[in-house]
Image: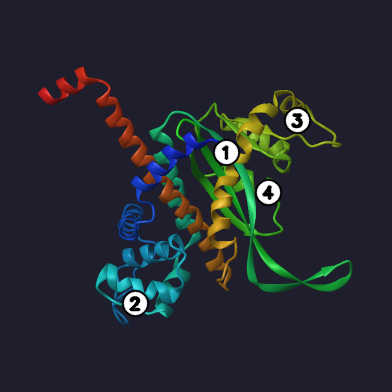
Amino acid sequence: MPLKYPNKRKRNGYWKIYDRARIKDFRKVWEFAKQIVEEQGTPYKKKDNRGRKPNLTYVENAAICIILVCFDLSLRDTEGEIPLLTNRALDHSNIDRWFEKLDDDYVYEAVRKLGTKMESMFNDGCYIADSTEYTTTRYYELIDGGKRAIELLTLKMHILICYIASIGLLVVRNCFASHGDAHDSPIFRNYLLEDVDLQSGRMIHADCAYFAIENIRKCKQLGLKPNFVPKENIEHSLTLKIAIKEYDNKARKKNRGLIEGFFGGTTTETDNKIRFVKDRCRKTYLALVALKHQIRTYFRALEIKALRFLYYFATTPIILGKYLQD
């Protein structure tokens, strides 16, 4: 008997939305990147009239940084694309300067705003938290067992995802970049759960690294239902005992691994490696990686919303006729 491909029906709809959304359309991403910067305000401080006037506007300079990461371009490749987009020129060294001036907090805010827009489009979902490591090209010295050692410098990307089950989208709700040795637990409560509007009553999944009294209390203060894998061989307080009792392993297994869809995409494209030398640029790059995923997801969400709208009118002829009469 010939072999059959599993889950073939599920893939048809995905590629239809993927193609229609045009998530890799260069000019479409360029225009949307400028729109993001215009709505949020320029990330650069305006100076007095001293010095030479920049070739591009502040909005275009910020959008160029987004384009650089969205399409994984080098500085020189980006330099070659600028005349096609703006009819002006910008040297690769100047692109590097504008990238260095871009603040990662500014990018985090853009990620959160897009996440809020997408989550408001649909009424279902749950939250998932996790992290992954990125490697750099630099080494640093440390003391290991009383001896000096050299290790490769790594960074860690912490992500809070909203999984919208009805359409299968992974929406980034918040993100943060830290040193590779940073623990997930304090980053989760001090950064990922801050400055973000989360829907109360929803479940939030994470592994045992997030199982802590402070994290559980913080989630419940926000109206969330923490579903963290319990730690073994520790003395449990009343808060942790209640969390263990409420723990839903079946729901965690069903949803927790979906966040790997985000990490799998970044690994496929860049192998989770950072080529920037300065720490500021590395953290900005990681923030823009999250924004890249957010932009592509937003295009898909808009396309799915449009298809749902057309399907609703196509299957409801009475309402369609009344709409045309009005």
The mark nearer the N terminus, 1 or 2, is 1
Could you say where residue 264 lies in the image, as x and y percent from the top left? 58, 51
| Disc 1: which residue | 2
Could you say where residue 36 lies in the image, as x and y percent from the top left? 35, 54
The mark nearer the N terminus, 3 or 2, is 2
The image quarter containing residue 232 is top right
The mark nearer the N terminus, 4 or 2, is 2
Q: Residue 184 carries which label?
A: 4
Question: In screen coordinates, is 216 left or right of 313?
Answer: right
The amino acid pointed to by label 3 is Leu
Q: Nearer the viewer, mark 4 or mark 1?
A: 1
Q: Can residue 326 be seen in this view?
A: no
The amino acid pointed to by label 4 is Asp
Q: Residue furthest left?
A: 325
Q: What element carries label 2?
A: loop
Could you say where residue 144 lies in the image, as x and y percent from the top left? 84, 67
